[in-house]
Image: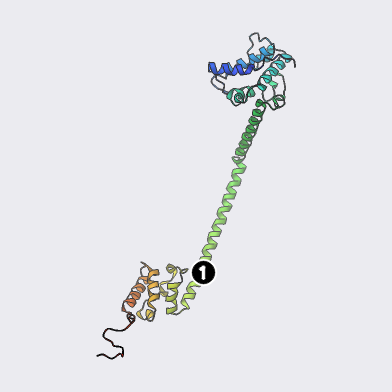
Amino acid sequence: MSTTTGGQWLEGVFRAAEASHWCTRPYCTTCGTRDFRRAFWSGAAWQAGVATHGADPTQPRDFPSEFSVAECENILQALIEGLRLLPASRCATDGFRTIIYDIDPPFLRFGTPIDLDAELGDSPAGRMLARLRARSALRRERQAQREEFNSPEAAAERRRLRIGQRARDHEARQAETRRRNLLRVDTINSLAAQSVQERLSRFATDLSLNLDSVPMSLIPALDSDVDGIEPEVAAALIARIGRRRRGWGRLRQLLQRLIVSAPAAPASGRGRGTTTGGVAP
């Protein structure tokens, strides 16, 4: 394609857009980015040596009918040359994206297919185009994932999995309940087979035993049941019983009376008024 280029002319279009406060947003639904788009298309036509004769290059239906295929190719090549010369700071703007969206995908609407990636190469514009393509691919992938996630088939599969998981959780809870019930039966049978003294000692020392699971019939309730229990065991059992009531409350009272009535331990050392020989004066 034979073109005439004027160096960094596209940079001048960006500066004019800033000075005139033109909208450069891609796909602006208010103004269509018309002023900015007219400026860079007209600039590209001027760089290509093509007279527009009043044609509006921002209107796809008017632009190709005004120019020949060769003129369209020259205009496009001038615009690509301007893009290649843009600094990296300009390539990170809405204006750059607006230009890219006007000519990519391939310039088929103006009759000129191009490989824009190859045309821009490793220029700042080419690197930014690669990033834009990567972002676009990621958006398409996420959109496809959302559509797949929200599809009726995926929703039905999730419902099936939830129902299956709830059934498995319910079965696991039932199995755990059966296990605890069997363990409680074994514990109760073990307690019933023990003597009262052994049972009281286990109540006091077996911290893994849940006292609330012990039937009332296995809780000693007579004074004779606590006779002979060591005060230390009685104190430990009182601490374990805590503020429990009913059968445990009665047992606590029996143990407390037992501790109160237990004889005090003899004092060590000599008694008052004794002599070395042990004979009172």
Total labels drawn = 1
Residue 58 x, y percent position in the rendering:
62, 16
Question: Residue flagged by tag 1: what amino acid is it?
Answer: Leu
Q: Quadrant of residue 252?
A: bottom left
Depicted 235 relative to depicted 5: above or below: below
* Camera sees residue 59: no
Q: Nearer the viewer, residue 16 or 70?
A: 16
Work out which residue is located at the far front of the displayed protein and give it. Answer: 276
What colouring does the structure picture have?
rainbow
Residue 269 x, y percent position in the rendering:
33, 82
Q: Name the residue under label 1.
A: 183
**What residue is drawn where x is 31% and y is 88%?**
276
Q: In which quarter of the image is residue 102?
A: top right
Residue 259 x, y percent position in the rendering:
34, 76
Residue 5 x, y percent position in the rendering:
69, 15
**What residue is drawn where x is 66% and y is 29%?**
127
Depicted 70 relative to depicted 230: above or below: above
**What residue is drawn where x is 37% and y is 67%?**
242
**What residue is drawn where x is 60% and y is 16%?**
12
Question: The residue tagged with tag 1: helix, strand or loop?
Answer: helix
